[in-house]
Image: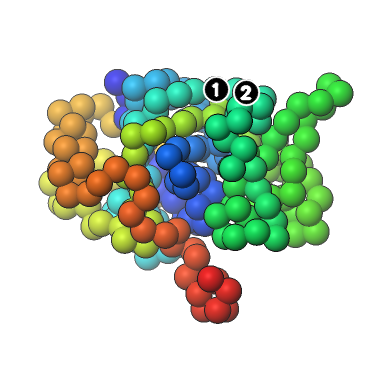
Amino acid sequence: MNIYSYKITRDYGFAPNPFGIYCTLACCKPHIRKKAVVGDWIIGTGAVQNGLLNHLLFLMKVTEKITFQEYWNDDRFNYKKPVINGSLKQIHGDNIYYFQDDKWFQVDSHHSLHNGEENEKNLIQDLSGEYVLISDYFVYLGDKCLKVPDAYLELCPTSKQRDYITIRNEELVERFIKSILEKYDLGLIGTPINWREYKQLQLL
């Protein structure tokens, strides 16, 4: 079992996308998506940018790992294809890439340009991860995030650490996960941190 921990600076319910029975990581964090395998754990914590350094936002056990085209073609994940004029959940769908006529396409989404055109930088970065990580065994806290107790701080990347860290202390991780699962039910607990921007605009 490998445990990957990274900081989330922007949490819109896009990466990860925690809605429905599956939490998915399809965009951003390409190195984690490429390396992680079924049975590994992903831990996401807050960052200095959102004032939530050392706060747990989500954790997920990888239960499936599939390609982007498999993700696009699988009917289970049609609800994760974005609908730009839909609800906030639909707007932030992460099932945005498909291959056709020897070319990858990016649909209008949170990772596109503001005018809906393809964002080549995001496309290249996202697709470099090659895979989509899927979990039906996760806890997403979002705006109900938990301050990580001092005893478990080594599970959180510091303000100076970038991308992600790999946790070697499996015993510590197992204790931490056990404590979270004793406190929370599986699934969606809170709403994405950055949805407060929509609340301020009275759009939620």
Name the residue: 84% across, 21% down.
Answer: 102
Asked if the residues shown at circle 1 and circle 2 are in contact, with their CB atoms under 8 angstroms apart, the answer is: yes
Task: Say which amino acid is labelled 1.
Answer: Ile
Task: Identify the element where label 1 is drawn.
Answer: strand
Q: Nearer the viewer, residue 76 or 170?
A: 76
Q: Amino acid type of disc 2?
A: Glu
Image coordinates for residue 27, horizontal then vertical, percent: 58, 39
Q: Nearer the viewer, residue 79 or 170?
A: 79
Q: Is residue 26 left or right of residue 62?
A: right
Q: Mark 2 sits on what residue?
A: 70
The image shows residue 45 at horizontal and vertical percentages of 35, 50
Residue 63 visible in the snapshot: yes
Most extreme residue toward the right, as rendered?
101
Q: Is residue 78 left or right of residue 138?
A: right
Residue 188 horizontal/vertical position (percent): 37, 50
**Real-space Cα separation, disc 1 to disc 2, in angstroms:** 6 Å
Q: Residue at x 20, y 29 (%)?
A: 169
Residue at x 58%, y 42% (from the top left corner) = 80
Where residue 66 is drawn, which disc sits there?
Answer: 1
Question: Residue 173: where, in percent of width, then height?
Answer: 21, 34
Instruction: Check the image and report above or below for 51 versus 71.
Output: below
